[in-house]
């Protein structure tokens, strides 16, 4: 599996120091408010993840280096972190990345305020770059996230939704922020409009593939790898591609009422039934095709090192399932 270290090595010696600066900037923004709210914001940031979205900002910028780029990368991660905190509130989730969530430890009000703080810090700090286009890009992605969440709530427990509806939801909730990361980096790097659009399309595609594979992982598990219980989406009433594909093949699955799936054991059993249809392999093939298209359509004028690093990011999205 490709690691962030592989990508950083391929992308050039400037990337590691830049990532370190982004981390320091994130920590400073989270702590700046003070009090319990900052403590929860800082803990959310420290829980980390692979920092894939900030890495895309830096890669899309080519060899650019500056405080504006650091702010853009941090802003994308703050928006991502905010949405995770808010998702946990809506889902009543106990675990995130294997750790107790803010809502589980501090309650709904504190968790909601923590997410709000992270959103506010993201936009407020990005404004300091003085680039209205950058603010528009991140604001549009944030609006798409909200629309995607509303769609997901509207679709809860409804296993009759179409694959097209599901993919639209994935675009809004996940792919648009990946696209924004790439666009922000390209803008900071001084790319022309055509290159910015091309890198943005790449980001949107790998973001879509990322979400498809994340939904596969929810069914395939295990918890020690995903940081959450297997079948969590099913327990929440969230209908994803594996279930939609499995229902096309198995009449017994078409007859299941998701509201009757109430315990982890029942969710595990449904995960096993979905996997038995071959739906997980088909979903993964769809994601692989999306990633291949993203790599093939990267702008031809990109420097070889930048292209290789972006290819590695795309390959890593797929490898996380392996």
Image (tube, rainbow, N blue to C red):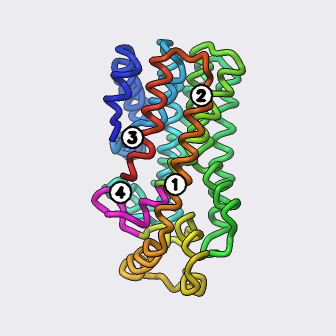
Boundaries of the magenta span: 214-230
Q: For this view, does 300 lie left or right of residue 64? A: right
Residues under numbered marks 4 and 1 in contact, where contact means CB atoms less than 8 Å apart: no
Residues under numbered marks 2 and 4 in contact, where contact means CB atoms less than 8 Å apart: no
Residue 184 appears in the rendering: yes
The residue pinned by badge 2 equals 298
CA separation in Å, label 4 and label 3: 18 Å
Tag nearer the camera, 4 or 3: 4
Examine the rendered structure and indicate whether residue 161 appears above or below residue 297.
below
Give the camera-side residue of 125 and 215.
Answer: 215
Q: For this view, does 77 lie left or right of residue 153? A: left
Label whose residue precedes the other's in the sequence (4 or 3) = 3
Tag nearer the camera, 3 or 2: 2
The residue pinned by badge 3 equals 45
Q: For this view, does 236 lie left or right of residue 142? A: left
The residue pinned by badge 4 equals 226
Tag nearer the camera, 4 or 1: 1
CA separation in Å, label 1 and label 2: 20 Å
Whether residue 168 appears in magenta in the rendering, the answer is: no
């Amino acid at each position: 599996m490709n690691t962030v270290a592989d990508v950083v090595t391929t992308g050039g010696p400037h990337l590691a120091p830049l990532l370190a600066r982004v981390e320091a900037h994130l920590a400073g923004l989270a702590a700046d408010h003070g009090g319990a709210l900052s403590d929860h914001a800082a803990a959310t940031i420290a829980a980390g993840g692979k920092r894939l979205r900030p890495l895309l900002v830096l890669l899309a910028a080519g060899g650019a280096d500056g405080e504006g780029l650091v702010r853009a990368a941090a802003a994308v991660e703050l928006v991502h972190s905010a949405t995770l905190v808010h998702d946990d509130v809506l889902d009543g989730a106990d675990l995130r990345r294997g750790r107790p969530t803010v809502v589980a430890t501090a309650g709904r009000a504190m968790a909601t305020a923590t997410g709000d703080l992270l959103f506010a810090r993201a936009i407020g700090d990005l404004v300091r770059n003085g680039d209205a286009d950058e603010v528009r890009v991140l604001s549009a992605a944030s609006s798409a996230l909200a629309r995607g969440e509303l769609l997901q709530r509207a679709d809860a427990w409804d296993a009759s939704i179409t694959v097209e509806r599901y993919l639209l939801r994935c675009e809004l909730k996940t792919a648009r922020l990946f696209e924004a990361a790439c666009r922000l980096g390209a803008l900071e790097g001084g790319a022309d409009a055509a290159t910015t659009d091309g890198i943005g399309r790449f980001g949107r595609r790998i973001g879509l593939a990322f979400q498809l594979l994340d939904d596969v992982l929810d069914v395939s598990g295990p918890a020690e790898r995903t940081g959450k219980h297997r079948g969590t989406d099913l327990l929440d009433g969230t209908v994803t591609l594996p279930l939609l594909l499995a229902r096309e093949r198995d009449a017994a699955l078409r007859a299941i009422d998701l509201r009757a799936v109430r315990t982890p054991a029942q969710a595990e059993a449904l995960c096993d039934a979905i996997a038995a249809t071959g739906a997980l392999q088909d979903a993964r093939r769809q994601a692989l095709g999306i990633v291949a298209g993203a790599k093939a359509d990267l702008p031809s004028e990109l420097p070889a090192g930048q292209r290789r690093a972006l290819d590695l990011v795309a390959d890593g999205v797929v490898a996380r399932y392996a």
